[in-house]
Image (cartoon, rainbow, N blue to C red):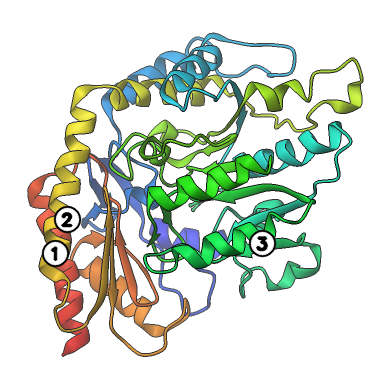
Amino acid sequence: MSLAQRDKAILWHPYTQMQTAPLPIGITRGEGALLFSEDGKTYLDAVSSWWVNIHGHAHPHIAQRVSQQLQTLEHVIFAGFTHEPAVQLAERLLRLLPSNQARVFYTDNGSTAVEVALKMVLQYWFNQGVEKTKIIAFEGSYHGDTFGAMSVSERSVFTRPFQQYLFDVEFLPVPVPGKEEQTLARLQELLQHEDIAAFIFEPLVLGTAGMVMYSPEVLNELLRLCRKQKVMTIADEVMTGFGRTGKRFAMDSLTEQPDVMCFSKGITGGTMALGVTTCTQEIYNAFLSQDKTKALFHGHSYTANPVACAASLASLDLVEAPEFLQNLERITASHAAFAQELAGKEGIKEVRQTGTILAVEFEVGETSYFHNLRDVLYNFSLENGVLLRPLGNIVYALPPYCITTEQLAQVYQTMEGMRQLIVA
Ligand code: PMP
């Protein structure tokens, strides 16, 4: 029996449990931007396995550092103990982040990084006896699958079974070009209310909403308004962090600084699961007390796993190497040229690009996640040996930064092929 058949008999995958879902593709090996399947096919991973493998697959530097760490210290509980990889990673991360970020909290994935961020800001006010309990988030945003993260995400058919358990959130329209004034006015209105605790946002690009993009200038303005009203701000850089927007972090394009930041995905370059939430010293100070009930009651068994921290340190070596920013520039320029070439062609509604993120929106009738078009585009991309992520009538490429010029051309050819398929 093939890997795929054994899997189909007993495993439960995210999103693909439908009876009609095709067999999963059994992957046996990865190298650079490529994945190799058990049936001898090769796939170009142009989405970095959901924006995780930023340096491609099986990077030898990360593999070596991980293997070394496994032989030294694989795990120790982080309540009351510490270790070199955790301390060193925090030191190095803080050097790269906005200067007001002073404390690092470890978890296991993007959703829990967000969960901790929400708990931090809500308890920050609670510990001080201030009644600020409401969160503001963008319409269409996605911050994860856990209950808090679902609460601050777009309510959809996916969250419907849990609706009664999700907390109330004020949703703000995304300030896409032409809508900036509307968003600013709505935020000003919301900030009149005394009970607003925090504003959580995906900086510059809302991923799951369909790579919806907005400018650093308007985000600066939104953050300035929040700061004036003493409303905490949370930058969810789970997708945008570690190079996606063409800079190390999306927040590097801003002059304003957020109070809290969330990271995961690219943080270990796809080797180990790790989430990080960072915050200001001011937030941390609100939890420092002789009163034990003021502590942050959040801790996972795998918190600050040394192997995950070591993987992240190795990934940071690559992030801080000069080739890193050069690669970002190369991919950004290449994407921008293709976007310009494709925009305005028949069958294209819009091409959006920020840094290494490229999204093509096709001109078609009504679509949804369940629309057949998604499957048609997905199958087409796999037949062309390229792993892209279609969502309704939108297709994304967020390639690993080691992708070659020839491989980028293959991605664009596949997208152009999709356009021809749609207009035919
Ligand atoms: N925040 C953002 C902006 C994300 O894109 C995602 C994942 N797509 C998450 C949070 C949740 O991360 P994870 O899947 O690791 O739980």
- Residues under labels 1 and 2: Cα distance? 6 Å
Query: The disc labelled 3 sits on which kind of residue?
Result: Glu
Q: Is residue 144 visible?
A: yes
Relative to 335, does residue 86 appear above or below in the rendering? above
Chain-order first, disc 3 or disc 2: 3
The one nearer the camera, 272 or 114, is 114
Q: Confirm whether residue 1 shows in the render.
A: no
Q: Amino acid at mark 1?
A: Gln
Q: Is residue 187 left or right of residue 323?
A: right
Q: Nearer the viewer, mark 1 or mark 3?
A: 3
What is the crowding at mark 1: few (fewer than 14 residues within 10 Å), some, or many (at least 20)?
few
Could you say whether the residue bearing mark 3 is in a helix, strand or loop? helix
Task: Estimate the spatial distance between the alpha carbons at disc 1 and disc 3, rounded to whole Å.
Answer: 38 Å
- Horizontal and vertical percent position of residue 388: 29, 62
The relative height of residue 113 versus residue 407 in the rendered view (above or below) is above
On residue 336, the disc is 2
Q: Which image quadrant: the N terminus?
A: bottom left
Please name the amino acid that badge 2 sits on: Ala
21 or 392, which is in the foreground? 392
What residue appears at the point 37 percent right and 53 percent down from the top-left corner? 215
Compared across the picture, whether 248 is left or right of 288 comes to left
Q: Are discs 3 and 2 less than 8 Å apart at CB? A: no
Q: Name the image quarter holding residue 327.
A: top left
Question: Can you identify the residue that label 3 sits on?
Answer: 189
Whether ligand 1 has any atom under 8 Å from the Cβ at mark 3 is answered as no
Q: Which residue is mark 1?
A: 340
For the residues bearing labels 1 and 2, Cβ distance under 8 angstroms: yes
Q: Element at badge 2?
A: helix
> Are there few (<14), some (14-19), or many (20+) residues within 10 Å of tag 3?
few
Crowd rating for badge 2 (residues with CA inside 10 Å; few <14, some 14–19, many 20+): some
